[in-house]
Image: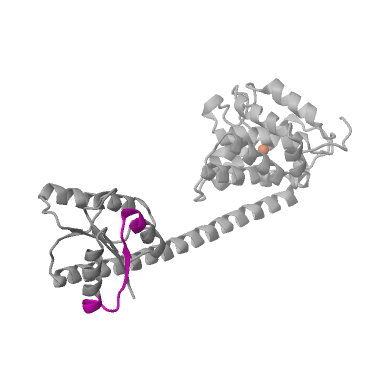
Amino acid sequence: MSKILAIDDKKDNLIVLEAYLKQYLPSQQLIIAQSSKEGIEKAVKERPDVILLDVSMPGMDGYQVCRELKKDEQTANIPIIMLTAIYTDTESMVKGLETGADAFIYKPFQPSELMSQIKVMLRIKKSDDLLRREKEVLEEMVAERTSALKDAQRAAVETIARILSIKDPQSSGNQYQIAKLSEAIGEKLRLSKIRLEGLWHASLINDIGKISIPADILNKPGKLTEIEYNFIKQHSQSAYEMLKDLPYPWPIAQIILQHHENIDGSGYPEGLKGEEILLEARILRVSDTVVAMLSHRPYRSRFNLEEVIEELKEKSNIYYDAGVTEVCIELLGDDDFCKSNFLTTEDTPNP
Ligand SMILES: [Fe+2]
């Protein structure tokens, strides 16, 4: 059963409408409202399939009611037939249609004229509802597929991170800390959700290029020779070669290629300066350094938070982006953030 809402301030008109509907459309339910305000309230509450709206009413007239109903997304899709006893010139009719009315009927009208208009509007409403439902189903399907795709991407990146931790046990577990710190810095710098996702992925696998470095160099307990260090430095370029053709929606390969570049141009592999370096790479440069300094290595103990902050301050605007450094220092000053991300060295002696 469809619902028809009639809004008219004159009771006699409503009685006539009710009689017509009982006779010609007995299976439809009629809801009546005797004022503009009551009409709007009932439209929201009852969600009728068609509204019959009188134009001249005290207070808000039919045009204003129509405008209100079309503005509200709960009632915007309900067809409205405007009923008027006044002769309406073309300009007024255009005004009515522009407020969102779907049809006009002049009083006195033939019952058959009104009934056929109501039937047309009911048909329009039915197909409109069907289209809307189909659209919702499609949107849900797209959202589900997108979410499944994101899960698959995330799982693939996490697998790469696990493989990397086997090859480079010294950095095992650090990848998640780097990713979380990068993400927190990115959030503070108001990066968009999509850029934050890219930053998280790039941070998690930032050292994937180390797979191409001989394990005895990578895990060497002592200080590296210059030749060995040059080998290590190749990991950004190797990562780029591995990732550049993957169809990621983010510039992951570029971010990782640039994650050892310094603001003053003294970094590697390309010696880029300042904003030539992607913001995500400047963030990763800082979060990677912080996590590395807070981690134990066979050839040194961990640094404590104060020393890490000192390093960031000293090299701000030299190695590290000043804005990124400032935000990172702010985060490192937040005990809860540090503890929840294991960025703490409470039980570690000074080196
Ligand atoms: Fe690296």
| In magenta segment, residue 68 | no
Determine whether, in the image, residue 68 is placed left or right of residue 177: left
Residue 154 picture location, percent across and down = 60, 54
Determine whether, in the image, residue 111 is placed left or right of residue 214: left
Residue 52 picture location, percent across and down = 25, 62
- Residue 235 appears in the figure: no
Say which residue appears at 21% left-offset and 53% top-offset.
56
Residue 157 vs residue 181, the one in the foreground: 181
328 lies above or below 3: above
Say which residue appears at 72% left-offset and 39% top-offset.
337
Q: Quadrant of residue 186?
A: top right
Say which residue appears at 70% left-offset and 26% top-offset.
312
Determine whether, in the image, residue 221 is placed left or right of residue 64: right
310 lies above or below 50: above
Residue 102 picture location, percent across and down = 22, 58
Quadrant that contains the N terminus:
bottom left
Residue 10 vs residue 2, the one in the foreground: 10
The coloring applied to the image is one colour
Q: Quadrant of residue 11?
A: bottom left
| In magenta segment, residue 23 | yes
State ligand 1's quadrant. Answer: top right
Residue 198 picture location, percent across and down = 56, 44
Q: Quadrant of residue 42?
A: bottom left
Instruction: Specify start and end residues of the magenta stretch as a single range.
Output: 22-40
